[in-house]
Amino acid sequence: MLAYEPGDSPAHRLDARSKLLVQAAFAAAAFAHTDPRGLAALTALAAALLALSATPVRVALAEYRGVVPFLALGPALESLRLGAPWVEPAAAVDPALAAYRTVLLLALVAAYVRTTPVRESEAAVGRLVPGKPGRLLGLGVGLVFRFLPVLQSDLSRVRDAMRARLGDERPLRERIRLLVTAGATRVFARADRLAAALRARCLSWNPTPPPASLDRRDAAAVALALALATWAVWPTFSGGPWPT
């Protein structure tokens, strides 16, 4: 389940703001360098960051097992043609690279969520975005991070109940209908209980954030983010690819 897991990895000890900067710079580099060589370099970096986050690659990919098939389907559909030659493999190259780039970004998101408490994410967004927009955005981030794992658990229980009642033997269309109906019912029920809980706790518009400080480890993360950002904008300002 995509949720925070306490630990003592190097990523756990970083400030949430430095991790968000690395995430943003990595995304910028991934969109700027879509060629195989650039994605290979980003793959190596992503593997190193996952290791520093104590997040195995298989665990990160398992969090998105429902999304990966759709990413794989895109290049396959792009290669299909309505006439001869019917299949054009070359047309699937760019969509496949874009899908792979998305997988790298999702893997880093999983590492961030698993190593960052929700309160720290809320406070980091509030500190990075000044004023009321930052507080509102931080509140939204906190609600999403708290709400999604609960919904994921609800859907998992619905699927387990369906299998226990031999629901997996029903036609695919019927299984999808039952899952969507039960999932929507759980979503509305959870939303109502969440609203009541927020009112009962007198939700604060400007809560006291947890203490935060930047140290040497965060300096290394910020330096990495600056390096990635520089790599992302280099072709724009230099008029050519990154020097080799």
Image (spheres, rainbow, N blue to C red):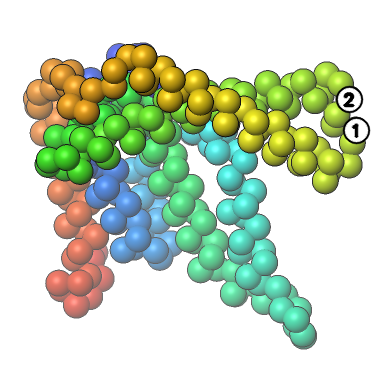
Amino acid at the residue labelled 2: Leu
Residue 139: give x, y in percent of width and height. Answer: 29, 32
Q: Secondary structure at mark 2?
A: loop
Q: Report whether 219 appears left or right of 79.
A: left
Judging depth in this view, the residue of 152 and 10 nearest the camera is 152
Distance, label 1 to label 2, CA atoms, is 6 Å
Label 2, on which residue?
Answer: 166
Residue 202: give x, y in percent of width and height. Answer: 29, 18
Amino acid at the residue labelled 1: Glu
Q: Is residue 122 above or below residue 226?
A: above
Q: Report whether 150 appears left or right of 167.
A: left
Residue 47 seen in the current view = no
Q: Secondary structure at mark 1?
A: helix
Residue at 14% from the left image edge and 35% from the top image edge? 127
The residue carrying pointer 1 sits among few (fewer than 14), some (14 to 19) or many (20 or more) residues within 10 Å by Cα, namely: few
Q: Quadrant of residue 243?
A: bottom left
Q: Are marks 1 and 2 in contact (CB under 8 Å)?
A: yes
Residue 82: give x, y in percent of width and height. Answer: 75, 81
Residue at 77% from the left image edge and 41% from the top image edge? 177
Label 1, on which residue?
Answer: 169
